[in-house]
Amino acid sequence: MKRSDVSGFYKKSADERWQIIREFGELESSEIDTIRNTGALRFEQVDHMIENVVGAMPIPLGIAVNFQVNGKDYLVPMAIEEPSVVAAASNAARMARERGGFTTSGTGPIMLGQIQLVGVSDPNGARITILAHRDEILAIANEKDPMLVKVGGGAKDVEVRVLETRRGPMVVTHLVVDCRDAMGANAVNTMAEAVAPHLEKWTGGRVYLRIISNLAVRRLARARAVFAREVLKTDDLSGEEVVEGILEAYAFADADPFRCATHNKGIMNGVDAVVLATGNDWRAIESGAHAYAAWKSGGYRSLTTWEKDANGDLVGTIELPMAVGLVGGATAVHPTAKANVRLLGVKSAQELGEVIAAVGLAQNFAALRALATEGIQRGHMSLHARNIAASVGATEEEVDRVAEVLVKERKVRMDRAKEVLAELRAKKTR
Ligand code: MEV
């Protein structure tokens, strides 16, 4: 029987690891070659990024065009495996351009570190005791990151909440940290760990967790765009009708979590793709976005808003937590991420976050416009059909011709792709 309890996998050489996975998965040597191909990265680089490395997983990198944010033009790198996302963002940005593109703002790069204190008999008293030590707490925290303090960041404030939980009251201290151009998890976690023993000493309680919160309500990015009604029209619908359709789609999402999860997913298609392309932590952004969508008004709601202005044009806004950085993490070491950041030309993490918010808004607009008009499948299908054609072995010359037939017949399926390819080849040899 095959066993997964491989002892000391992390100590094994790359050759040994490939041998182990090859045997376990009964892989072909060509499959091992695919896995071990690390592309733009040297094997030693990936080997140092995570544990038990055997290779790298390439994701397509596309460029969204047409973006204008606060009057500045951007070519936006997007790393994503899903067809249509990059084209949709580019299209939406083109439409937003007509009315000046996106205007954005942000709150500044403030993150919260949480310290969980339990076992205090007088939680409200403990809260006041902790707050009385505010300056000392900030000094202890800031000692841990003099570089951050030097560039104007660091721990700036302390907040304390008494939380009722299933295990009784807890005293939760928030360290309010200005992370400048860092995502901040390392800085904040180190500070929280340094402060924790002092809280125990002052209150007699016991600290358990000391960790950053991804619900980054003090690190929001915002964007707004106006979509002129006349540019929204389709072959079948007037601009006014499209505006109404988008408003109906938004109202549906904002009223129904089942729809809203998908609506917000569409936003995250754009957001995550830029977050990944710039080497940032897309899981942090995902959890922050959805938590914020639930937290801000006490129920799971849309991250965007859509309205009609006095001219009948469509006005969209977005606001979401945006804990992205430019220094530290993969952004600083991954050569593709570094090149992507240079291409974007952003000078601060906040600027990057605001561009990402604009992409999220564009992506949501594109999805709602498609859904409220011809439906999402037509656009999706031609790219999907090309993927299906390629997966059944169509060569580069054959892919488009096979895909065309599949779309026309509305049968974008492997079985039909195989038949169409065979017919095409048979015709050729005749
Ligand atoms: C697909 O990845 C995203 C959409 O489902 C978003 C939406 O429904 O709004 C099209």
Image (cartoon, rainbow, N blue to C red):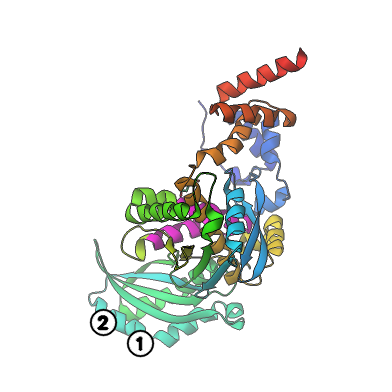
Q: Which residues are magenta?
A: 264-293
Which quadrant holds residue 338? bottom right
Q: Which residue is mark 2?
A: 125
Which amino acid, by three-letter code, is at mark 2? Gly
Which amino acid, by three-letter code, is at mark 1? Ala
Q: Is residue 281 visible?
A: no
Point 58% across, 31% down: residue: 407
Give the Cα separation between the discs numbered 2 and 1. 11 Å
Where does residue 25 sit, x and y in percent of width and height?
58, 30
Where does residue 175 sit, x and y in percent of width and height?
43, 76
Against 186, residue 177 (above or below) is: below
Point 35% across, 76% down: residue: 200
Q: Residues within 10 Å of mark 1 (few under 14, many from 20)?
A: few
Against 420, residue 225 (above or below) is: below
What element does badge 2 sit on?
A: helix
Q: Is residue 298 visible?
A: yes
Where does residue 403 sit, x and y in percent of width and height?
63, 30
What element does badge 1 sit on?
A: helix
Looking at the figure, which quarter contains the C terminus? top right
User: Residue 407 bears which disc, if any?
Assistant: none
Residues at marks 2 and 1 touching, judged by CB atoms closer than 8 Å? no
Point 66% across, 50% down: residue: 62
Observer-nearest residue: 346 or 161?
A: 346
Q: Which residue is mark 1?
A: 132
Q: Position of 131 compared to 47: left or right?
A: left
Q: Main secondary structure of the magenta part?
A: helix
* In magenta stretch: residue 275: yes
Tell which circle, 2 or 1, labels the residue nearer the N-terminal end. Answer: 2
Observer-nearest residue: 12 or 312?
A: 312
Observer-nearest residue: 100 or 272?
A: 100
